[in-house]
Amino acid sequence: MDNPPIQGPIFLIETNKISPNPHQPRRDFDETALRELANSIREFGILQPLIVTKLEKENETGTSVEYQLIAGERRWRASALLGLERVPAIIRNTNLEKDRLELAIIENVQRENLNPIEMARAYSKLQDDYNLTQREIATRLGKSREAVANTIRLLNLPTPIQESISKNQISESQGRLLLSVPDLIQQQSLFDDLLKNNMSVRELKSRITKLNKPAEPELTQPAPTNNPENLFLQKQLEELLGTKVKVEKSGDSGKITIAFYSQEELQSLIQKLSSTGGENQPL
């Protein structure tokens, strides 16, 4: 992304008088990347000035001036690694913490410096600590309200999944798909498969669609009804066999269930049925 146009005069400010913004939305500063940036600065200089705000503090000898970063912490850290005494910076006058956070977010968004989780935390802080609505946040950042809402929802994911999004192991879109799985065990299983098999967004969506699809109800046969004839036959069989019998009939077909409770009882039933069949007694 091209650097946005520089607005305001540029000053050379002592590096040791600049402090990081405690509300800086960016959390991850990779040491290897910082050393690479330091090497670039050593060769080409700082191409884009830092953005700071002035902090005046009263002390015994008068007023001391310090500066707090709004944007450019990576450049400031890399400059400190090189031992640079001064860095170019633009001074923005703002005294409210909310404005400093808002400016830090805007500057980082313009440079596409924040990962989705850092962005979500920043939006959430503006919403919870400074009472901005999602629509107000969206308007200030030039985004849609839905985009802001979807990004904040990423904070509902378990910490390991958030960390994977921060490290670019999975995408923001894949993270939002995992949010649609309410069962945490199933969600974790899908997340593990996602890391192991490097599934695409389409493949993950297909898996989740199948997982969330309600099971089709099984077709069951209507329960047979016991009419007086069935009950009469059932009673006759119970008297003949000396155990519980169930007669189920549907149309011209059906089944007879005979209960037994031991191996001996089963052998006795077999003998009774054999002898009954030989005598050809009507039921």
Image (cartoon, rainbow, N blue to C red):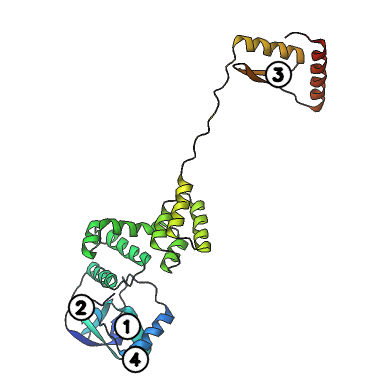
Q: Quadrant of the C terminus?
A: top right
Amino acid carrying mark 2 in the image? Pro
Distance CA(mark 4)–CA(mark 3): 96 Å
Name the secondary structure under disc 1: helix
Q: Is residue 90 left or right of residue 249?
A: left
The numbered mark at residue 233 is none
In the rendered image, residue 126, in percent from the top left (x then y), is placed at 27, 62
Do we see residue 244 in this rendering? yes
Q: Which residue is mark 2?
A: 5
Q: Please identify the quarter of the rendering in which residue 121 is found.
A: bottom left
Distance CA(mark 1)–CA(mark 4): 16 Å
- Seen from the viewer's position, the closer of residues 139 and 22 is 139
Distance CA(mark 3)–CA(mark 1): 89 Å
Amino acid carrying mark 1 in the image? Trp
- Seen from the viewer's position, the closer of residues 11 and 246 is 246
Name the secondary structure under disc 4: helix
Q: How crowded is the residue under tag 1: few (<14 C-alpha within 10 Å), some, or many (20+)?
A: many
Q: Which residue is mark 3?
A: 244
Q: Which residue is mark 1?
A: 76
In the rendered image, residue 231, in percent from the top left (x then y), is placed at 64, 12
N-terminal of the two: label 3 or label 1? 1
Distance CA(mark 2)–CA(mark 4): 23 Å
Q: Are marks 2 and 1 in contact (CB under 8 Å)?
A: no
N-terminal of the two: label 2 or label 4? 2
For this orientation, the residue located farthest to the left is: 8
Q: Which residue is mark 4?
A: 43
Q: Is residue 87 above or below residue 110?
A: below
